[in-house]
């Protein structure tokens, strides 16, 4: 069936049949044919994956066999450039010996340079688009801002710092997005002071003082609490855990200051749900108010 598809120049179908045949039994001639058709149809990433399955030893090779050349070519055009450079480097001594091998080395290096330049151009174009968008993004809605924050990490660090700070103090930006920004700055290990404003809470902190949201002491406390919590309805318990995480993420990094403890949070949630009419002190009223604010703004997202 693969040969029939090949004769009719249906290379994608031929590749499909050949990869199935190779999965059943390895055959170097069929593999060479399949890789050639993959290259002709620009299935470069699929070619890298096929070589990983069929010839994993190539990654440690210093040879310049046709399969080695296929590997480097596929890596280049799959844009796995760091790996392509490493594989060329492993073979550089061999490639530099003879005239034919030297020519092959030059061709591979030239192809690598071309793809690198294309990637650089694409990156610069993306940066220009994000820079333009940054001039008006604060006036856009939640989903557009969320999309922008996934893309703005491509910016140079100076611009990343400036935009991050403007988001963190702007009251129009949803608290969840501010949490995402802080996680990005922590992950990138950017050394800077930021002013964070969420609802009535505001503080200036160095990013080095912050912690990933998963390492929040209040969340760790809640895990122990819910693990021991005696509740007959597992779905309700899961919902409680989710709600607590969302409220912590909403107020991060002020979660301890706002929610006090998981026990006090749970008592406040019971007050909201059951409306027991219990007389509350000032701190309890404030906690309930903060929970209701978070719930209101979380519900806005689900209604979008």
Image: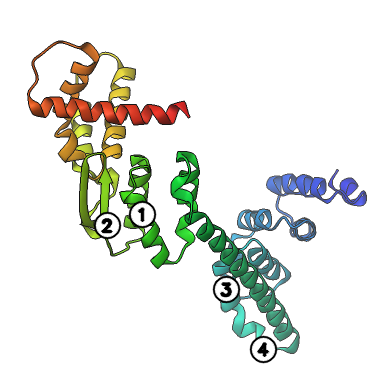
Image: 221 above or below 82: above
In screen coordinates, is 37 left or right of 253?
right
The residue pinned by badge 4 equals 97
Q: How is the image coloured?
A: rainbow
Q: Quadrant of residue 274?
A: top left
The residue pinned by badge 3 equals 85
Q: Position of residue 243 (x, y in %)?
A: 30, 28
C-alpha separation, residue under disc 2 versus residue under disc 3? 39 Å
The residue pinned by badge 1 equals 166
Q: Are marks 1 and 4 in contact (CB under 8 Å)?
A: no
Which badge, 1 or 3, is on the more N-terminal residue? 3
Image: 191 above or below 15: below
Q: Position of residue 38 (x, y in %)?
A: 76, 56
Q: Using the image as rendered, state which of residue 61 and residue 74 is in the foreground.
A: 74
User: Which image quarter is the N terminus in?
Assistant: top right
Which badge, 1 or 2, is on the more N-terminal residue? 1
C-alpha separation, residue under disc 1 versus residue under disc 3? 39 Å
- Residue 15 visible from this viewpoint: yes
Q: Secondary structure at mark 1?
A: helix
In screen coordinates, is 115 left or right of 194?
right
Which badge, 1 or 4, is on the more N-terminal residue? 4
Q: Position of residue 129 (x, y in %)?
A: 56, 58
Write the residue at 53% across / 58% down: 132
Q: Nearer the viewer, mark 3 or mark 4?
A: 3
Q: Secondary structure at mark 2?
A: strand
Q: Secondary structure at mark 4?
A: loop
């Amino acid at each position: 069936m693969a040969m029939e598809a090949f004769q009719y120049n249906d290379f994608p179908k031929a590749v499909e049949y050949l990869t199935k045949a190779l999965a059943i039994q390895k055959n170097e001639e069929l593999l060479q044919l399949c890789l050639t058709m993959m290259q002709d149809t620009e299935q470069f990433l699929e070619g890298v994956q096929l070589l990983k399955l069929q010839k994993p030893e190539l990654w440690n090779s210093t040879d310049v066999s046709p399969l080695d050349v296929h590997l480097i070519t596929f890596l280049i055009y799959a844009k796995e450039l760091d790996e392509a450079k490493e594989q060329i480097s492993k073979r550089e001594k061999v490639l530099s010996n003879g005239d034919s091998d030297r020519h092959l080395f030059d061709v591979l290096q030239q192809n690598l340079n071309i793809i690198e330049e294309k990637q650089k151009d694409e990156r610069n174009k993306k940066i220009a688009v994000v820079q333009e968008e940054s001039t008006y993004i604060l006036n856009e809605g939640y989903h557009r801002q969320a999309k922008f924050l996934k893309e703005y990490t491509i910016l140079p660090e100076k611009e990343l710092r400036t935009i991050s700070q403007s988001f963190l103090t702007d009251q129009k930006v949803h608290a969840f997005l501010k949490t995402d920004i802080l996680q990005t700055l922590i992950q990138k290990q950017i050394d800077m002071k930021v002013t964070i404003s969420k609802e009535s809470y505001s503080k200036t902190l160095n990013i080095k003082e912050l912690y990933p949201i998963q390492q929040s002491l209040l969340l760790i406390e809640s895990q122990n609490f819910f693990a021991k919590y005696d509740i007959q309805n597992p779905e309700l318990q899961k919902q409680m855990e989710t709600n607590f995480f969302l409220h912590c993420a909403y107020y991060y990094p002020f979660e301890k200051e706002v929610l006090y403890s998981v026990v006090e949070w749970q008592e406040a949630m019971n007050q909201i749900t059951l409306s027991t009419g219990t007389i509350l002190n000032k701190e309890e009223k404030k906690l309930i108010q903060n929970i209701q604010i978070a719930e209101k703004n979380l519900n806005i997202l689900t209604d979008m």
